[in-house]
Image: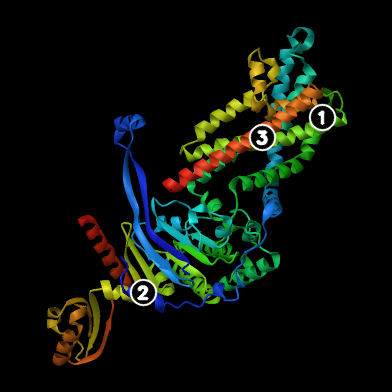
Amino acid sequence: MTPPDAVAARAASPVAAPDALAADGSAPHLHPSAKGPAATARKYYKIFRASLVERMTYRGDFLFGTILRFLPLVTTILLWQAIYKGVPGGEMAGFRYREMIAYLLLTNISRMFSSMPGLAGGIARDIRDGTLKRYMIQPVDLIGYLLSYRAAHKVAYIVTSFIPYALLFFVCRSYFDGFPDGWTLAAYAVSLILSFLVGFYFETCVGMVGFWFLEVTSVLYIVMTLNFFISGHMLPLDLLPQPWSGLLKALPFQYMAYFPAVVFLGKVKGSALAFHLALELVWAVAFMVLARGLYRLGLRRYSAYGG
Amino acid sequence: MAIIEAEGLTKTYRVFQKKEGLLGAVRGLYRREYKEVRAVDGVSFSIEPGEMVAFLGPNGAGKTSTLKMLSGLIYPTEGRARVLGYVPWERVDAFRRRFALVMGQKNQLWWDLPAADSFQLHKEIYSLPPAEFDRTLAELTELLGVEKLTRQAVRELSLGERMKMELIAALLHRPELLLLDEPTIGLDVVAQVAIQKCLRDYHARRGVTMLLTSHYMRDVEALCSRVLVITHGSLVYDGSLTGLADRFGQTKLIRLEFADGTVPADLARFGEVTRSEGPVADLKVERSRVAEVLGAILDRHAVLDVSVSDPPLEQTIARVFEEGRRTHDAA
């Protein structure tokens, strides 16, 4: 279907001898030679830093959000106070009243690491409105980018809300039996970092559903509501009757709220602690593999049906 | 070696046919009917380094689908393509570092941050050496005249300024191939001209290969010497812009100014009089009859001034599209 004058036009077109084809091969276009895992790590670290700058522009939001987050705690404390008045022996499933309040305070710390507001919804939206194309065209991986961005978000959040949190825990210090020892604290820190990864990859998997369904808000709502309960954010999983308590403790969701809190309270120790930390890592990796697989499948579908 | 080589590119979409009304919606739950839509149908062309080529076609002709295949966003149903020596839909990093796609309707920059921060991010994404990056950025902001605006939040910029920032972001890694989908959409004439000028200057400076789609014929006239016209998924013309008028423009416009101050009454028998004001008249005649008509008029009347021109490009393009539609319907 090419008319003959096309050839003439092509020959006559002002090809300004693009320097890309310079005979000596000294391409003036930038083709960075940076390769390998170190360069990749550097790239995502830089994305992390750039995102950190971006997130810091919203620090006002953070402060306000932190204060609001703790308002419901007042009612929660009053509620549990009332419940424990009717409990013989002042203990439920191994939790005394003070421990219960401490637990609920600590799940907020867990969620600070593992909750990913807007992550799944954001991925689904990117798929739907075509922002995803950016990650297909530029030499950057969507999941790697989002992980760097989230990590920056979390660091910014934790730094800016450190003072209000410290204040809160100081006010509530009577609910705690002093600080745990160094090893427990170290295990706690590891459990929190892993809970970030579990939360991140889990929500990424949920977001990938957007490749198959246009409307995901109801799916997200169900998952998030369920997660609030089965992660132990609402109450310690030990409070549930068997087999539910055992079942929920076998699921990965407990690592997003329950597990770090009980580590801090010293309720998991020794080999059980090591086992659960390892299992938490396994879940993080499993969700990562699943997220990557779903992303690959989704991209294949997206590329076949058009975006 | 050609920068873009496309051979028989075909893209078929399966479109879900939703039935009307509630009953139809319920039926759609268990039995879905699909219709095959051939968005691109056996398109072949090749583009040499340094060319500036326009992709023309009515809405839904397959321009954007073709651009998407060339940039690796979608797979073709059939056909082959090589872009910069790569198969685009394999999306290897080495390929992605060497081209850029600018979509006039899509935003790549962080909305709440100054463009400079987004540029920094691009620097990291493309792993650009700092010195090179600084030099390129300085060059581009100067070329587009936006040195003072890069520290302002993107949401506070005008549409035209934002588009300039998008262009800078796309050019920071010095792509060899620039694919532009409606780069001037929604811009006022001043901003359109500014974007055109920048693209032209950049092309002159760097010799980058450009393939653009646009609805504004001004963009095409200002930038491209070669056009590809696509209608209903098929390439109907590949050649020079002037050749397009020769091939499809069947009429010419003769403007006459008569010495006696009025337009003669018998002018209409030579062709269609499209304008008549005082001593000046526009006459539309078939190309083959221009010489004959001019001779006859000059014989009979005293003419002060005469000029012959092609009708506006829009009209020619509309005719090409129309012709494409007819052959498509007949097939």
Q: Pointer 2: residues within 10 angstroms few (<14), some, or many (20+)?
A: some
How far is mark 2 from mark 3, CA to CA? 58 Å
Residue B301, horizontal then vertical, whole percent:
16, 91
In this orientation, which residue lies closer to the viewer: A25 or A125?
A25
Q: What kind of element bears circle 3?
A: helix
Task: Chain letter for mark 1, please.
Answer: A
Q: Chain of mark 2?
A: A
Whole-number angstrom distance, CA of label 3 to CA of label 1 = 34 Å
Task: Residue at the far top: name it.
Answer: A88
Judge depth for marks 3 and 1 and give the one in front: 3
Dot 3 alpha-carbon crowd within 10 angstroms: few under 14, some 14 to 19, many 20 or more: many
- Indicate the secondary structure of the residue bearing disc 2: helix
Pick the quarter of the image with the N terminus of chain A.
Answer: bottom left
> With respect to residue B119, does B30 lie above or below?
above
Q: Amino acid at mark 2?
A: Val
Q: Amino acid at mark 1?
A: Val
- As rendered, which of A254 and A68 lies closer to the eye? A254
Instruction: Give the structural element (helix, strand or loop) at label 1.
Output: helix
What numbered label is drawn on residue A171?
A: 1
What percent of the width, then of the height, locates residue A273?
A: 78, 25
Q: Which residue is mark 2?
A: A7
Q: Which residue is mark 3?
A: A284
Which amino acid is tagged 3? Ala
Horizontal arrangement in the rendering, residue B258 relative to residue B88 (left or right): left
Corner quadrant of residue B81:
bottom left
Labels 2 and 3 in the same subunit: yes
Closer-to-camera residue (B51/A79): B51
- Residue B162 locus on image (x, y percent): 54, 61
Q: Earlier in the sequence, mark 3 or mark 1?
A: 1
Front-lying residue, B306 or A5? A5
